[in-house]
Amino acid sequence: MEESRRNFMIQCATRVTLSAGGVALLSSADISAAGLQRYHVVRKNENLTVIARRYGVTVNNLKLWNGLASDVIMPGQKLHLRVQHSSLPLATINRPKINTAKWKNIIAHHSATYNGNAKIFDAAHRRRGMENGLAYHFVICNGTNGSADGKIEVGSRWLRQIKGGHVKSAVYNNNSIGICLVGNFEKKWVSKNQQASLISLVDYLKNTMLKGRAKFLVHRELKNEQTICPGKNFPAKTLHKLFG
């Protein structure tokens, strides 16, 4: 009886709105209703479409909220029913005064190395003569060098709201947020934790901070860059389905 009441309240309260990025988000009424049931446990023969219809949300919502870059789900898996940013170091990300007019793009990279973290890359970039050190604004670790798999590290370029050094183009360096995932994705796959952190970070930067205005790209999509970054095993197509 209690389960039926919860489902009825969720269905009655659900009203979908659109963010500037075109991704459906929950209204305040939705969030209150979803609070009664924070997650759904996947049952046999259920898919994302069935679950999305049940709760009055979209498949893209479910994928964003759960860090999914594919439609594959398994029985027994817990799916969050509202936005999740618990993996983000929000206090650090929100520390600087954000220049929302400056950032036009969010560009994803791989390090093309087996291991690393922000500190290691910062030292390497300084040895190459980069005055501001770490070329990226964010690094997503892969569990090596003492950094947890999926940990998001915030670089000084973000904290200072200054240009990146992650591409050849001066224009893109000036107006693009650089995110580097540790790993060589020509040879390996992005870890599930890295993937979830990347989706959560891009969602927050693009749809919350920049109101959907920033364009998501991967490095190789820039003209005249002559690179395979972030590698053939990076889920670029799926991320474009989420973020355009």
Image: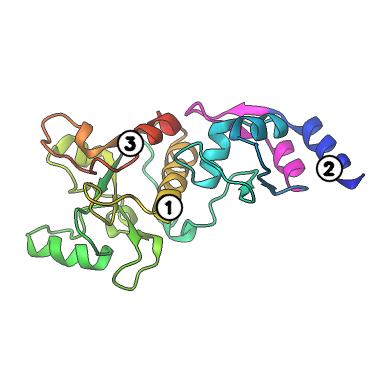
**Residue 30: x percent and y percent?**
71, 37
Residue that label 1 marks: 192
Instruction: Find the magenta span and give its range.
Output: 16-35
Residue that label 3 marks: 236
> Which residue is at the front of the view, 57 or 139?
57
Confirm whether the magenta stretch covers residue 20.
Answer: yes
Relative to residue 160, is residue 37 drawn left or right? right
Compared to 198, does 156 lie above or below? below
**Kind of residue at badge 3:** Ala
**Residue 171: x percent and y percent?**
18, 35
Compared to 49, does 174 lie above or below? below
Confirm whether the magenta stretch covers residue 97.
Answer: no
User: How dense is the environment of label 1, judged by Cα within 10 Å: few (below 14), some, or many (20 and up)?
Assistant: some
**Residue 82: x percent and y percent?**
63, 44
**Kind of residue at badge 1:** Lys
Name which of mark 3 and mark 1 comes first in the sequence: 1
Mark 3–mark 1 Cα distance, whole angstroms, equals 14 Å
Give the secondary structure at mark 3. helix
Give the secondary structure at mark 2. helix
Mark 2–mark 3 Cα distance, whole angstroms, equals 37 Å
Tell me the quarter of the picture where residue 111 sits: bottom left
**Residue 173: x percent and y percent?**
20, 41
Residue that label 2 marks: 6
**Kind of residue at badge 2:** Arg
Which residue is pictured at 66% across the width and 31% down the height?
50
Which residue is pictured at 17% across the width and 40% down the height?
228
